[in-house]
Amino acid sequence: MSSRSREPQDAPLLNRGVASRLDRVVDSGLLDYRSEALPTWCPGCGYYGITHALAAALTERGIENRNLVVVSGIGCAGRYPFFFKGYGFHGVHGRALPIAGGVKIARPDLTVLVVGGDGDGLGIGGGHLPHAIRRNIDVTYILFDNGIYGLTKGQSSPTTPQGQRTGTHPYGNPDTPLDPVVLGLGYRASFLATGYAGEPDELAPIFARALAHRGFSFVPVVTPCVTFDAVNITWDRMREGWQPVPADHDPTDLTAALNLALDENRYYGVLYCEPDRPTFADAEADTAARAAGNAP
Amino acid sequence: MGRDEPAEGIDVTIRICGAAGDGSLAAGGFMNAAAARMGYHIINIDLYPAEIRGFGKSVAHVRISDRPVHTPGTKADCLVALNDPHSITEFGTLAEGAVVLYDSRPPVYWDEDRAVAGFIEPGMVGYGVPLGELSARATRSTRSRNIVALGALSGIFRIDPGALKEGIEARFGRKSAELAAQNLQAFDLGRSWALENLEKTDAIDFHDRIPGQREGVRVVSGNEGAARACLEAGVRLYAGYPITPATKIMEILAKELPARGGVVVQTEDEISAIGHAVGSGFAGTRAVTATSGPGLALMTEFIGLAVMGEVPVVIIDGQRGGPSTGLPTKTEQSDLHIAAFGGAGDCPRPVLAPADVTECFTLTRTAFEVAEAFQTPVIVLLDLFLCNRTEDVNFSDVDPAPWGAWAEVRAERHEGEGSYRRFAVTETGISPRAVPGTPDLYHAVTGLEHNERGLPDYTPENHLRMTRKRYRKMETLLERWPEPELAGESGRAEVGIVSWGSGIGAAREALAFLQTRGVRAAGFFPRLVWPVCEEALRSFAERCERVIVAESNYTGQYAGLVEQALGARVERLTGVPAAPLDPAAIVAAAGGEA
């Protein structure tokens, strides 16, 4: 495909400003993680911003394409693996974490990035989250929380606010929504950060820290569905109430992290981080040593 | 005396029945280990009958023969009664003239209508031994009645005591030398009491032959065989959720895999188990999960994904009685259809079914290679009878690859024009596979219908092309898979018997019996049960006047596949007796008199 290579005959179509910006993008290395397939998301979708931030984080971490595995379930975010240059596994609905666990346990040399939506990760796949956390598998899980089932055109998700009208709840959603941040802290993920899609430049360093964390890093990100949600997480409402995690916050303090999560303000950044918790691989190395020494 | 062969003409089935804590299963274990050590062939299964009256009845069923045996046998020649009321319910399993060894002074008083002695009819042989008293003399408790009974059996049947005592000493010696000595004394007391006080009126005689040591012979269960296959295959990851009767495989691997560079993950459910295995297979390492029917039901969506994404993974299913939670401790062969067809859409995958313990090892071993060679999930159908039964196996005599060697086609570097075609349509249906970590051969595996490059493509032309590709792999497998086992009559036969899995043992014994009765009978015993080896089946059916398909399920699941392949009806021998297939039933169906 030559759509992204700048052939001479294309040059006259671009004014100088656009061309130099394109150069900057190419030189940034951000496109190195883009596959030849073009994203299928709606124009204006928050996922573009998240993708940009992720590419920046991968660039910063210097992850080689051949060692990158992107695992997803089903949903708009599930299509992610197709748009990344690396190895991808687009699995079945809700089961990205088990697949990712298998990849990482079998091949610790790979960087495993898990992406998925709120329905995929908290609805159908909600049973896997605590156990991936419990095992402290060294993967990064980014939860795209748009509060709606977008790919199937607007049904209630586990994070849809109570009372919101959706395709499956035309008279209003009767259920109270889950809060992925509180859940993740409650399950005691060894790393939890959060943010929103509106400011990719703020997200990128958060993702980079998540990728750098040894252990399970969980990053719920609030993002709008511009097509099937006109009332809850719109571009304007998405930005309301956010501020950076306070400079004096101690990310090793779970109670402090929970207090931030339960606060009426929303805080982007790293809420909780337990850098020394043994990963599954660490525990397995111990097991192997005990097995070799024949002392169970 | 002193010859290194086992006594001839021996084919004895012993059932040791007790309540929980009576040690009946332990006694069975000692008996079959000793028999294997003496050079006999054994088959043993521990039973927990459904018709439990009271609590915790358990029966060790041991068959000992000087020839290889394939089934537990139809009727028992001897019942050792460690609990009277439970043992009375066992009388229906006894052969004519069977021996009943019972406690003449049981530790619990039983009314006449609940005491074994009152049920021994003329024609049977009853031996009352004061098991409890002798036990108390040796160990100051009645807990070693089972060991006393073994001693008595040794005296009555003239079983060389050395082999039995070796096992008893080894087992109790692990706890303490004193305990070992006490139990050996219990054995000796039982043996000498029997020799001094009983008049032998039965015909079972092992002639006190000195054990003919068979080097390297081990008593192995089907689960142990399958676990050994996983170890030898170099499995990187076992992911599983405990379920009867497959848990033992996980427990063995949990102990053995870590020192061999493998990992066992106990997942939150079977969906996660196969998810982990599929992830590991995708990453280019060998992965396996083992389960039973309810777990397989949960796994079907992932099986579809592995078929669609062409990911190698091995799934071992220890079938039990179904549907739903069904009969968790009973054997059945009723998961064939879910194994072959479970899940959405046209979803081809091979199903292999071993016939005995040795094949639990060899066929599971082969399953890993087939999974990689054809980039597919492979289901290995065991059943509870195969999982739990033990046989004498000498692994150094076992050909580890009787079904051939199968190699994977990997892609290591980028060749040709354009980007890598992970799902390239080829003559065999097999596309060279790249795994993560390989430079340049980037792609995504997906459960969506996709084109050769792995990108979603829902056009009817593409769906047809890729569906054909996936089925083409099954055709290639059929072309390369060895001919199914044909047994008995090789020419025209009056009756053809088809069976699969653990049913093959019963069919084989039925076949041998029919031939001794002059019936020209032939057997068709496939190990690749899906897809069906149509050509071989057709030529088999053509030379048989009748075809009977024998299996342990209600509907005749394999019979249905056979009929589909033949385009003709066959006779079905089906049933859900919650017990292994009975050779006598096959003989009866074939018109021979058992």
Image (cartoon, helix red, strand yellow):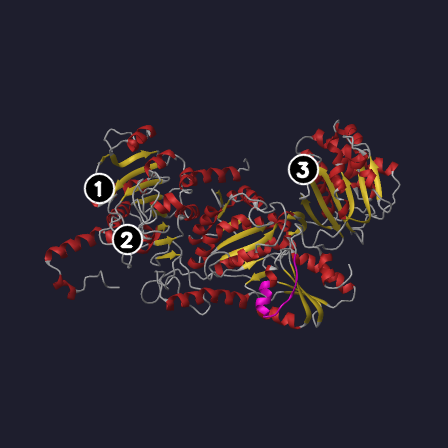
The verdict on residue B361 being magenta is: no
Q: Are marks 2 and 1 in contact (CB under 8 Å)?
A: no
User: What separation in Å lies between label 1 and label 3 (alpha carbons)?
Assistant: 64 Å
**Residue kind at label 1, given as amino acid type:** Arg
**Residue kind at label 2, given as amino acid type:** Tyr
Secondary structure, mark 3, is loop
In the displayed structure, does residue B67 sit left or right of residue B528? right
Q: Residue furthest left?
A: A16
- Does residue B527 appear in this view? no
Does mark 2 fall on the same chain as mark 3?
Answer: no
- Does residue B100 appear in this view? yes
Does mark 1 fall on the same chain as mark 2?
Answer: yes
Q: Nearer the viewer, residue B421 or A67?
A: B421
Tell me the chain of label 1. A
Mark before the other along the chain sequence, 2 or 1:
2
Secondary structure, mark 1, is helix
In the image, which is nearer the foreground, mark 3 or mark 2? 3
**Disc number for residue A237:** 1
User: What separation in Å lies between label 3 and label 2 (alpha carbons)?
Assistant: 62 Å
Residue pictured at 36% horizontal, 37% vertical = A184
Q: Which residue is mark 3?
A: B56
Range shown magenta:
B560-574
In the displayed structure, does residue B82 sit left or right of residue B295? right
**Disc number for residue B419:** none
Tell me the chain of label 2. A
